[in-house]
Image (cartoon, rainbow, N blue to C red):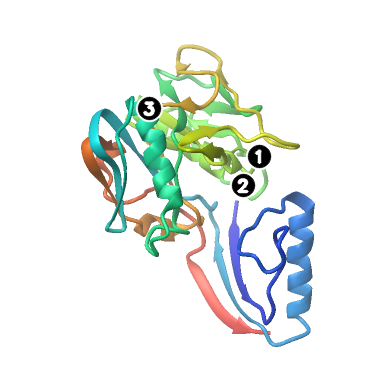
Amino acid sequence: MPSQVIHLRTRRPVDYGVTPGSSTINRRGNVLLRRFANVIMGALSEDSLYTVGYSATEAQNANGGLTISGGAGAVGAIINGVTVTATWASSDTVSAGLAAAAINASVNALVQGFVSSNNLSATVTAATVVAGNTVNIGGETFTAFSGTPVNATSMSTVGIFDCSGSNSATATALARAINIHPVVSRYFTAVPVAAVVRIFAVQFTQAAGVFSWPTGPGVLPNTITSSGSTLAVSSNGVAAGTVFSLYSLQPGIGGNAITTALSGTGVTVLNTAARLERGTGPISFINDQS
């Protein structure tokens, strides 16, 4: 599915939240879309600068993660060269939550607005998957397909992943299917590690380093199930653990430029990745004025 992004510079502040002019976007659904439509209409009646980006492929947010095992002292991550840590306390699971909270609380210009983090995750392990095997995430079904589905511009390939290759290739295909899903990707993001798909929460609530699944009308259920042992699920939903995510807040290839490294005793980076990965989206841009 093609994807677009529009950066519009307006003369006046826009109310996307409950506080007019605030930088916090906390309106959702149709209300948010109506506000955005009003901004577009207003831009047609005055001089406005804008940038449009387009890609023939789906937009994905770049992602990654780190694991704490036998942690001690200050533990966390180095993001864009900035060290963000928390003091290890009580257990690796508790400390992963504290490290994630420290990342979210950072006001450093190279961290704030670039990534979010939490330690809510689950895994799906691919083991000789065959066509027709399924994973259900948040009520949406992902079905294994032998071969590459036609990349139609319709919704016909949503929730389909290729299982014709190795277990690792199947895990990579499932992770991509999750990350481009128009509904599931709003709540979950996936990182393939060999034959294992690590599924993190995207949306969450947090308090003092303790993360929880969000609640409220329209929120996707925190459920992960599968058709059987070929797609073994670690838990029926994401839960607090020793692995914490790094999730680019902006979709697109720009997220792949965010650098990552471990910081502290017992900390490792998933896939030993030096940058966030899997970001795709608009690559052709034009600047113009209305």
- Structural distance between the alpha carbons of marks 2 and 3: 42 Å
Other-residue count near label 1 (Cα within 10 Å), few / some / many at <14 / 14–19 / ≥20: few
Q: Are marks 2 and 3 in contact (CB under 8 Å)?
A: no
Q: Is residue 29 above or below residue 137?
A: below
Going from the N terminus, do you reach mark 1 or mark 3 first?
A: 3
Q: Are marks 2 and 1 in contact (CB under 8 Å)?
A: yes
For residue 166, say whether it is visible.
no
Point out the residue furthest to the left here.
265
What's under tag 3, amino acid-wise? Thr
Query: Relative to 57, is 172 on the left or the right?
Result: left
Residue 152: mark in rendering: 2
Residue 77, image x, y percentages: 30, 46
Query: Relative to 138, is 116 on the left or the right?
Result: left
Going from the N terminus, do you reach mark 2 or mark 3 first?
A: 3
How many numbered marks, from 0 up? 3
Q: Is residue 52 above or below residue 158?
A: below
Point out the residue furthest to the top here.
229
Give the residue number, with chain letter if any, for mark 1. 156
- Structural distance between the alpha carbons of marks 1 and 3: 39 Å
What's under tag 2, amino acid-wise? Ala
SS at mark 1 in the image: loop
What's under tag 1, amino acid-wise? Ser
Between 206 and 216, the one nearer to me in the picture:
206
Query: Relative to 266, is 100 on the left or the right?
Result: right
Residue 74: mark in rendering: none
- Structural distance between the alpha carbons of marks 2 and 1: 7 Å
Residue at point 56%, 65% (across, down): 54
Single out the mark in the foreground, 2 or 3.
3
Residue 211, image x, y percentages: 51, 34
- Quarter holding residue 140: top right
Other-residue count near label 3 (Cα within 10 Å), few / some / many at <14 / 14–19 / ≥20: many
Give the residue number, with chain letter if any, for mark 3. 93
